[in-house]
Structure formats: structure tokens, C-alpha cells
Image (cartoon, rainbow, N blue to C red):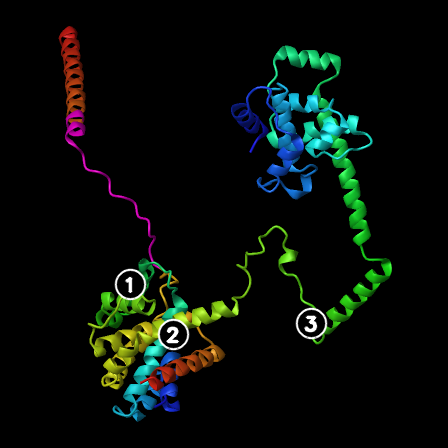
Amino acid sequence: MAVSDQQVATLRAFLEGDKPKYNDLLADLDRKSDGLGYSALVTAAFFEAVDRRFSTQSPRADAVDYVADVRSRSANAAEDVDPRIAERLIREVLGDGSTDDVDGRTSASTKLYLLTALTIDADLDAAELDQFLGKVKKMADHMLSRG
Amino acid sequence: MSSSWLIDCVRRILPAGAVPDPAAFREALTGQLADLRKPRGIRHQLASLVSAAVGGVAAGHGGPLAIARAAAGWGQEVLAAHGYRADEDHDQNSSADLDAIIAEEDKLPEPRTRQEVAEQEQSGDDPLIRTSDETSHRADGERDAGRQEDADRWPTPEERAHLHETYLDWRQEVSAGREQGMNVVGDKPDRSPDDRSDLPPTGEELVNMESDSMSRFDRLRNHIYKQADDITDVAEKTGNRALELWERPPTETHTEIPSGRPEITNPAPPALDGGQFVLASLTVGMLGYELLRAVKNRVNTWKGDSHGSK
């Protein structure tokens, strides 16, 4: 199983902040057949974005500060993002700790918020976004190919 | 083994004045002694040195230098019996050889009294000075001989030209098709050659970085399956709420909102405290008292004027 172009296009619209296009493409995704591929794609994108923004030597305070900053950007973010879970997700990407006890829904929701904020902050142009998505797709395909 | 130790041994084993036949003694020693000296410095067989030392002890000499000085007066036959070769300039060299050899083996000369040292220096017969001078001359001779030997081993100009030509051919063959490398480190003499902080990562470092990143990503494998069933729902609901972050810029900049009135207003005057109130009352009372007294004086003055006019 591999990540489809439609899944990549959906994530691209999300990362560009194109709400109408995102909703259109998202509506075409099948919950059962696209769930695993899109989940792999979002996870890979979150991993890559965190890996670019932070380093494995970053102090914990960096993750704490960043999550606080994201939550302060909107009332919805403050309401939807659990700071402890968000910080743990970032730290897990950096090789510190685990979020195995966090349910999939909460984990996915928090990842989408953090991924949006990280993308806004990275201020990627079209070419950089293509390069980012190309790498993310390879990572997701690699993960799915290993079962 | 030092010569002092050897002399002590000879003294203990052989009675005073007893001396073995040098030739037989030396033959008996040959093959029994392990010579640990460096081959380069050997000028006499060890058995010959021991034989001479035994003879010197038998003659009543107490140390290696005394034995060496005595040996300088031995005849060629005696020296030959001890195994020393008979040189033409024996009389000059034999004692110096013995001095040098024994002193070299001992490293430390036999102790002398201050009076002996002073007397030998005045007479110019100090064996240490003579030994060091002659040893130095001998070492110079050996160095010259070594240089001559090395010079003989150098290739001739023709051979060197041939070797150089062969080297150039080999170098051209090896470097064919390659670009000449540039010594980047050499351009920065003030930095350690091991300092690669401003250079791109090596292939090994890239592989390690990649493997580290992939191993961390592999740890997120369970995320994919855990959220697979809910991801489309979450993407629809939470995704749209998350996209609202685009509507608000990051908090890195501060937007100023103009105001219609000045931000700084005059502060309200502070209320009177008790001390100030008492002070004010006292002041007002005194002023009132003075005012009443002035009015009363004025009235009295008027009354007096009116009574006087009457």
C-alpha cells in the first residue's frame, strides 16, 4: 500500500491553508481505504516539521514555549490543544518519551494543530512545500511498506 | 653488571695477590658471559675486560679507573694475554680505551677525594678530562666514517634521474582522470585540521543522521494505525478549526491600536493624612486668633477715640 496523490493533494491544501480546496479534497477521501495512507502522511509531515523546527538537543522548555505560543494564537487552539499532550508529542519525535497512552483521536487532532502552526512559521514557498511533501510521501510510503 | 660490582666479586673470591693465568682465564670466560652491550660500542671482548679487571684487583687496585691507569703501563705481551690487540700506538690508546670503556660501563667514575682531584688537575693528569677528550675525538672519527659510508650508499645522479622519471610516470598514471584536489584545511593555518565545523557533513555523518531520523520515525509507527480510523473525521472537524490559525498571524509581531485620548493621565491628588489635617487646623486656629485680636484692638482704639472726643 502506498500514499495516493489525492492524499498528498489534500495535505498540500491543508498546509497551504486553502480551506475550500482542502474540504473538497477531504470529502473525496474514503474513510476506510484512505485512512491508513492519510494517517501515515500526516504523521510523517508532523515528524518532519518538528524535526526541522527543533533538534534532539533542544531543551524541554522549547517545546513548552512553542505549545504555549500555539495555544495563544486562537481560542479554538487553546480549547482543543492539551498542552501536556502536545509537548509530549514533540518530545516523542525528538526521541524523548512516548505517547502510547494517548488515544488516536486526540493524537491526530493535536498533530494537525501543531502541523498547521509549524507550517505557518516555516513560511514555505511553493518549491519548498513540494520538497517537503516529496520527502514526507517517501517517509510515509516507507512506513507503510514495512507493514 | 658494573665493573665496581665485578671488582667486589673478584676481591671476595680471589685471595689478595692471587691471579689466574690471563689466557686460560679468558678462555674459560669466553662463552660463559652474556654480553648485553650494544654491538656498536664494543671495542674489546667482555672476557678481556673481566680478565684485565681481575688482574688489576690482584695488583691491588681498588677501582676501574685505577685499574685503567695501571693497564696503561702494561706491556703489549700482558695486554695480548688479556686479549687486547696490539696496536702501534698502544701506549697512547690502551689506557684511554680502558678508561673509556670502563667509564662508559660504570657511567659513574670511581669516587676521588678532593685532594686527589686538585692534585690531578694541577698536574694535568686528570683521567676524566683525558678520557672525555679522547672519547670525543673517537666519536668524531666514527661519525666521519659513517658519513662516508652513507655517501657511498647514495644513488648516483643517473640513478636519481631515473628514479625521478619513474616516479613522475607513476604519479601521472595514478592521477589520470582526476582533478587536482585543493587543500582547504591548509588555507586556514590558524585552525586545527580536525576542525570541520564549517564543512558539510561527511557521508558517514549523513548516514548516521539519516539513520537516527528514521529510527525516531519508526517509533511513531503505532501512531499511524492508532489514528487511521479517526483521521478523516478529525481532519474534517479539527482540521478546519486548526486552519483558523492562518487567520491570525503568529505572535511574533505586536499590533498597536491608536487611542483617542492620551495614555498618560494626571494622577489624582493624594488625600490628606492625619498629620497634615492637624497642622492645617493649627494654622487656621492661629490665624483666627490673630485676626480676632487685631479686630479687638481696632475696636478698642475706636472706643478710646470716641471717649476722648467727648
Q: Position of residue A20 (x, y in %)?
A: 34, 86
Secondary structure under the numbered disc 2 in the rendered image:
helix
Please check the rendered image and state whether residue A117 is part of the magenta-colored stretch, yes or no.
no
The mark nearer the N terminus, 2 or 3, is 3
- Residue B214's tag is 2
- Residue B175 in sight from this viewpoint: no
Please check the rendered image and state whether residue B270 is part of the magenta-colored stretch, yes or no.
yes
Mark 3: which amino acid?
Glu
Secondary structure under the numbered disc 3 in the rendered image:
loop
Q: Which of marks 1 and 2 is in front?
A: 2
Q: Position of residue B118 (x, y in %)?
A: 68, 12
Q: Quadrant of residue B231?
A: bottom left
Left or right: where B270 falls relative to B194: left
At horizontal 64% and vertical 25% (from top left) the residue drawn is B55
Q: Mark 1 lies on which chain?
A: A
Marks 1, 2 in one chain: no
